[in-house]
Image (tube, rainbow, N blue to C red):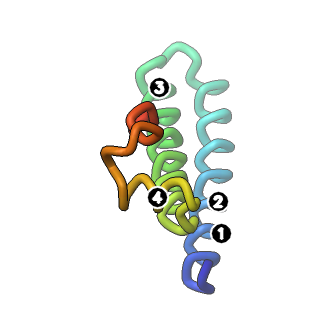
């Protein structure tokens, strides 16, 4: 992971923590307005998905993943779950 990746990860984590705190506060305050509460949690879900995607892009492939890319028709690669 490069310094840039670590900065982005920290920034994303900070944004996520702030969004969670704001969503909790908003949902407590506006319990009657379920749409705004749901929207706040949807934005958190999007941030989490963004973090997961950037993390998976930063991780090196396993030997098995590299093997399956090189040999996509190998029987042992046929039963893998696709992302």
Label 1 belongs to which residue?
A: 10
**Mark 2 surroundings within 10 Å by alpha-carbon count, few (fewer than 14), some (14 through 19), many (20 or more):** some
Comes first in the chain, label 1 or label 4: 1
**Residue occupied by mark 2:** 13
Given contact means CB atoms under 8 Å apart, are the residues at marks 3 and 1 in contact?
Answer: no
Are the residues at dot 1 and dot 2 in contact (C-beta closer than 8 Å)? yes
Q: Residue 67 carries which label?
A: 4
Tell which circle, 3 or 2, labels the residue nearer the N-terminal end. Answer: 2
| First along the sequence among labels 2 and 4 | 2
Q: How far apart are marks 3 and 1 (CA)?
A: 25 Å
Comparing labels 1 and 4, the label whose residue is closer to the camera: 4
Q: Label 3, label 2: how many angstroms apart (C-alpha)?
A: 20 Å
Compare residues 3 and 27 and report the one nearer the observer.
3
Q: How far separated are the C-alphas under marks 1 and 4?
A: 32 Å
* Disc 2 versus disc 4: nearer the observer: 4
Q: How crowded is mark 3: few (under 14 residues within 10 Å), some or many (20 or more)?
A: few
Expressed as whole percent of the image width and height from the top left, the position of residue 58 reads 54, 68
| Residue pictured at 55% horizontal, 83% vertical | 4
The residue tagged 3 is 38
Report, in whole angstroms, how far the alpha carbon at label 2 lies from the one at label 4: 33 Å
Name the front one of labels 3 and 2.
2
Question: Which of label 4 and label 3 is nearer to you?
Answer: 4
Look at the numbered disc 4 and give the secondary structure of its residue: helix
Q: Tag 1's secondary structure?
A: helix
């Amino acid at each position: 992971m490069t310094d840039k990746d670590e900065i982005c990860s920290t920034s994303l984590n900070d944004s996520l923590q702030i969004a969670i705190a704001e969503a909790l506060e908003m949902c407590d305050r506006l319990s009657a307005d379920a749409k705004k509460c749901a929207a706040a949690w949807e934005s958190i879900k999007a941030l989490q998905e963004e973090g997961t995607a950037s993390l998976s892009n930063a991780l090196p492939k396993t030997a098995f993943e590299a093997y399956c890319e090189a040999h996509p028709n190998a029987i042992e690669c046929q039963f893998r779950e696709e992302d």
